[in-house]
Image (cartoon, rainbow, N blue to C red):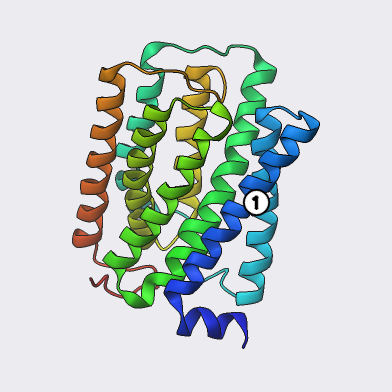
Amino acid sequence: MRLASFTSLHPYRSSIGFLLIVVAVVVSVGMINRLFLMGTLVQVALGDLILAAIGVVLLTRLDWWEKAGFTTGLRLVHVPIIVLPLAFALLSLGTGIQVTAPTAILAFAALTLIVGFAEETFFRGLILTTLLPTGAVRAVVLSSVLFAAPHLLNILGGLWDPAFTVVDSIAAFGLGVTFAAIRLRTGSIWPGIGIHAFFDFTSLLALGGITVTTQSPQSLVTSVCIGIVFVVYGLILLRSGPKGANGGAITP
């Protein structure tokens, strides 16, 4: 059975299959890092470069470049709906910037662009598109759950504080809802890639690296609240939007 036919007939199994590719790459690259001690930043960059390459191959095999929103740019009329996510991304800098060296800033910018492209390609490109025939709201929610799940892997290796990892997964679910809603409202995946990269970039500047130590209770509560805000915002975008990803009405 051809890949396009399989995804059409089995959207749930196909979306899980795409998620398993993500998990397999992340775990495999993590094991390689343990053997060769590449460093955390190199590990993340390598993993997402591999995911980006796999995503490009899958999109080409499925002939989904247009369907997944890669051939449509951001129109001026849609700019207002991305202002709120960009503003929230700046909140990370409220505690200050830990990285000021130009080379480090450029490295973080390159890394976050790779991460934004790879993750949006899989979750808002492949997985969301696969699930859309089941209904827009259901596709948005399920793709966001699948987006949040791999964030729990950051507990492995002690990179992230366990409490923060759980809270970040909740925030990731909320962001996933908003990114998916923006993808459907604009018909383009590029705004999501840009916002995703900007969120990661500001976080890296504020933290100074990938590792996250124990966070204050106030910080954890704030992250949960941000996740809730983005769930609500994404659902509002879905309900109020006149057009869907392919120019049709967005339906539940």
Q: Position of residue 250 (x, y in %)?
A: 27, 70
How many callouts does the rendering have?
1
Quarter of the figure with the C terminus: bottom left
Q: Quadrant of the N terminus?
A: bottom right
Kind of residue sitting beneath label 1: Val
**Apparent side of residue 101 relative to residue 159 in the rendered image (left or right):** right
Q: Is residue 197 above or below residue 149?
A: above
Q: Is residue 67 above or below residue 22?
A: below
Q: Residue at x 33, y 76 (%)?
A: 134
Q: Residue farthest to the right?
A: 36
Residue extending farthest bottom = 1
**Residue 146 picture location, percent across and down:** 42, 56
Label 1: state its secondary structure: helix
Measuring from the top left, give residue 114's x and y in whole percent: 62, 42
Vertically, is 7 above or below 240?
A: below
Q: In the rendering, at what x and y percent does residue 29 appear? A: 69, 43
Q: Which residue is mark 1?
A: 25
Specify whether 244 is left or right of 206: left
Determine if residue 176 is in view.
yes
Q: Quadrant of residue 184?
A: bottom left
What residue appears at the point 55 percent right and 57 percent down from the top-left corner? 121
* Viewer-closest of 35 and 9: 35
Q: Within 10 angstroms of label 1, few (less than 14), some, or many (20 or more) residues?
A: some
Q: Determine the image quadrant of residue 90.
A: top left
Q: Say which residue appears at 65% left-offset and 53% top-offset.
A: 52
Q: Is residue 70 visible?
A: no
